[in-house]
Amino acid sequence: MGFFKKKSNSKLHSNSISTSQMLKTGSTNVLKTNLQENIQRIKDSLGKSSDIIIREIRFGKEETIKAGIIYTDGLTDTTSLQNFILETLMLDIEGTELQKKLSPDENLISVLKDSAMTVGEIKELTNFEALFTGLLSGDTIILIDGYAQGLIISNKHWVERGVTEATAQVVVRGPREGFSENLRVNTALVRRRLKDPNLWMESKVIGKRTKTNVAMMYIKGIANDKIVKEVRLRLDKIDIDGILESGNIEELIQDTPYSPFPTIYNTERPDTVAAALLEGRIAILVDGTPFVLIVPALFIQFFQSSEDYYQSAGISSLIRILRFFAFGISMLAPALFIAVTTFNHVMLPTGFLISLAAQREGAPFPAFVEAIIMEVTFEILREAGLRMPRSIGSAISIVGAFVIGTAAVEAGIISAAMVIVVSITAISSFVSPAYNIAISGRILRFGFMAIAASFGLLGITIGLIALLLHLCSLRSFGVPYMSSLGPFNLSDQKDTFIRLPIWKMFTRPLLINQQNIDRQQDLASAKPEPPKNKESEGG
């Protein structure tokens, strides 16, 4: 595939060579000692873009030192540029002991870096690739005439959305804050919850043109080293022009791209990421998106909500069982109705069968066609509700479904029972806490409807067996997708269909974590023995 790096060093097609790759060839990538040549090279490479600000200044004793200040308007903090860079160079140095050091005999780059600049992060640069990467990321570049070196001063600043409430995964009880589009804000939200020096973070830059910052976070000593290595290899293998959202990363590193089931979990909740890291999972954070990827992801995980661990075990277990039941309804309810009304009439009570026959007496279409019409109509309404403005989107979807369903029944096109079945199916699809697993159920729903119309309950049974075999064949970064059901692990059943109290959950998931299993002390085994009776000792 063209999105992954090849092992051979064959040359890429000339049309796909990026500016950065051109700069790497030969000595053209190295900065020149002449300031005007460097500035002209920057102008030519960036097409003299109007948002690239280049200012030439003089400073030092008798203003003999020529320098160039380059930054990107809109990405750079101009206030810090004015107060801590320009003012320092042009005003504060004059008349101080530092001015004596600014002579041709001294290395001006080192003097400015170590003694003059009062900003936080400063790096030296010697090539145009690092210059363009820093410049287009919002950093300020300082070049000095006579030096084939420069400085990258970190003073990025742009308008961004602050930390707001998570909208895709809403909870009744729990933290309200969600990730934002800023990578550093997101890593800080995770660090705020896990103040552990073993929480390691590896940063990568992916995308030849977008140069998107990607961070991989895991807890050393808890995460499986083999899975960490596998994630690192898959990220390093990506060779693509741009990464605009974490969904691009997800599609490029997942195990089974053609499966309807997701093998990578995504969330915009920092508490969910922190809990996953404590279990031994790995988080992948992408700059520019509030959705963080979590690997490995298991089938059971998509039915777990962070709210399950903030309420009592009994309530959480009941709600989780309800989620599994609702997923089954959303996937199988129309198919079961089609199979029973078309092939397996004897399974229905006589009174109910007569009622259904009376409703369908004037219906012009078979049950399968009715279900297809209603399901497609509801999917259209769902999409319309999502794409419309929020103030009217929900009203359109609800009113549209009610009006269309009522009109279809009154016109005799659709039976009333089919409208009820499709409505229950649609409502059940919203119960899943993870949006992508609900989409999987919607996709499979149409397949089960087709085999139910062809083979009845026998076809549904065969379809379920095939679905189960497919689920058992999936892997997520080497971990079986159906863990802890297949392979079955008794100790992990404490947090599968039901959730035991937290004080009963002593160990982490076995197949995900294989080196630091214990997450808390077994209170029963740690309980001190009761004092012995003195009389019994004497006896």
Image (cartoon, rainbow, N blue to C red):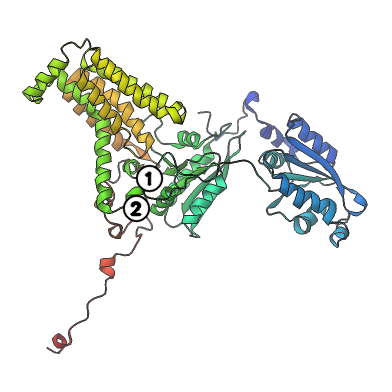
| Residue at disc 1, secondary structure | loop
179 shown above or below 539:
above
Residue 49, x across and y down, in percent: 74, 30
Residue under numbered circle 1: 171
Residue found at x 68% / y 53%: 121
Query: Which amino acid type is marked by label 2?
Result: Tyr
Q: Nearer the viewer, residue 66 or 206?
A: 66
Query: Which amino acid type is marked by label 1?
Result: Val
Q: CA distance from mark 1 to mark 2?
A: 10 Å
Q: Is any part of residue 151 visible from this angle?
A: no
Q: Nearer the viewer, residue 415 or 108?
A: 415
Check whether the beta carbons of the residues at disc 1 and disc 2 lie within 8 A of each other.
Answer: yes
Residue under numbered circle 2: 310
| Residue at disc 2, secondary structure | loop
Residue found at the far bottom of this picture = 538
Of the numbered discs 1 and 2, the one sitting upstream in the chain is 1
Residue 69 appears in which quarter of the rendering? top right
Label 1: how many Cα within 10 Å (few below 14, some 14–19, many 20+):
some
Q: Nearer the viewer, residue 111 or 253?
A: 111
Residue found at x 10% / y 25%: 348
